[in-house]
Amino acid sequence: MKRRLLLFVTVLGFGMPSGVYAQSAMAGEEKWLVETLEKNMDPFADIAMEIWKYAEVGYQEYKSSKLLQDKLKADGFNVETGVAGIPTAFVASYGSGSPVIAILGEFDALPGVSQAAVPYREERPEVNAGHACGHHLFGSGSAAAASAVKQWMAKNNIRGTLRFYGTPAEEGGAGKVYMVREGLFADVDAVLHWHPGSSNSASASSSLANKSAKFRFYGIASHAAASPWNGRSALDGVEAMNYMINMMREHVPSEARIHYVITKGGEAPNVVPAYAEVFYYVRHPDAPTVKNLFERVVKAAEGAAMGTGTKMEYEVIHGLYNLLPNETLAEMMYTNLNKVGGVAYTAEEKAFGEKIIASYEFTKADINTASQIEPYEVIMTGQGGSTDVGDVSWVVPTAGMRAATWVPGTSAHSWQAVAAGGTGIGKKGMAVAAKTLALTAQDLFQNPAVMEKAKAELFEKRGAGADFMYEALLGDRKPPLDYRK
């Protein structure tokens, strides 16, 4: 059931419930591309599993990034690394001239979700993070698509430029925002991306804009029993801020989401805390509203410091635009996803999946939906989570999809997502995405008029047309390379 912030929905129907691509629906070059991908998928699946094992968090993905770079170099791409002031960010290119088609790839893990590839809760003692959002599959699947398209371009002397953007720190680090701000997408005609999920879909849908900051309070330490009057509690500042924000919730738009975690609260109960920190996220479907809400959060922090006799400073960590759906590209991607089909489980994978479903606390799911394609929808008002792909979509026509790399019903950022992502279920979903991206890139190279139509749609939807001036929500700050340390 769609939430009431849905502006309008267009439903085109269900796709083919097939785990194998529909050859009858494909032309000769499409078949060649998909078959080439299938023949060369194993090395990319192996890379995905290595990145899953590394579980490197945002801006620390040195080994993960290098694996992808080395593979793309070996496959004939020119690789520029350390772009936008980020050591783990890179751009791999093949070809020259127009059009320029880009495919995005991510590879950062989430802290605190360590999990083995088993259908029950079991942490991996060697790591304290995990790929609970499936970015190990995202980067590797996108790279597999790019490699196959490159081979097709070389075989057919296709004119144009293919790029793979290695984009780190999506989880709260806004890696793509810095790449957009540096102008790395300025000459790109279309951008394709995907994301792991528990179902297969390719709708034209938005997301929530998001801005975050760490609010740091400084007090005066003192003995909490013998001389508390000589102290000023930084933790009191954090708690006073949180109390005011929680009262503010009644007076913000219903679509807004404000959440926080206290990252530092003091050292011992008998010491008045001299330092405390709280990390806030502010979200809404509309970026200007996020800016307004964030300013109110800052005011609450200032008031909390004044009332508790402490000092406060804050550091903006990231800021993201909402996704701007492009129906022209989304319809093309949806058509290709239906040609590819969903994920077909083996008996062993189905048994694994049933155990995962049994572990859900609040969700019921049908394991058979992994083989289906969800109806196409147009959702212009954001909901759910946020992504730094949003900033890309405001400067270049962009389309994305989801593939069933997790067992149906699995929530992102859960141990169940990590577990399935480390198995053949994750690999199969990755293959669905890689084939769909590759076919869509192929279509774009062969149909430049589609990109012109997509660009016209972008100009119309964002307003100001070609005169639109992009301004990052995070301002002019440098990439927070140590935000996960």
Image (cartoon, rainbow, N blue to C red):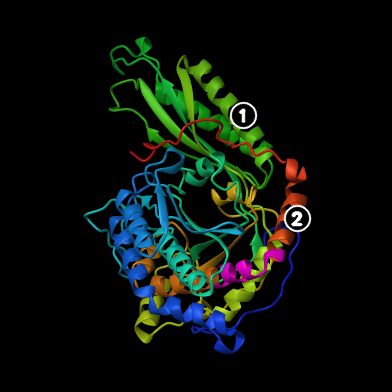
Question: In the image, is residue 161 above or below residue 235?
Answer: below
Would you say residue 124 sits in the magenta stretch?
A: no
Q: Position of residue 100 (x, y in %)?
A: 58, 57
Label 1 residue SS: helix
The disc placed on residue 456 is 2
Label 2 residue SS: helix
Q: Position of residue 351 (x, y in %)?
A: 36, 81
Question: In the image, is residue 414 above or below residue 420?
Answer: above
Residue kind at label 2, given as amino acid type: Ala
Quarter occupied by the N terminus:
bottom right
Query: How far separated are the C-alphas under marks 2 and 1?
Result: 34 Å
Query: Which region is colored magenta?
Result: 439-449
- Answer with left or right where residue 371 lies relative to residue 467: left
Q: Residue at x 31, y 15 (%)?
A: 222
The disc placed on residue 356 is none
Pointer 1: what residue? 295
Between 50 and 34, which is closer to the camera in this rendering?
34
Whether residue 226 appears in this view of the structure is yes
Q: Position of residue 422 (x, y in %)?
A: 34, 67
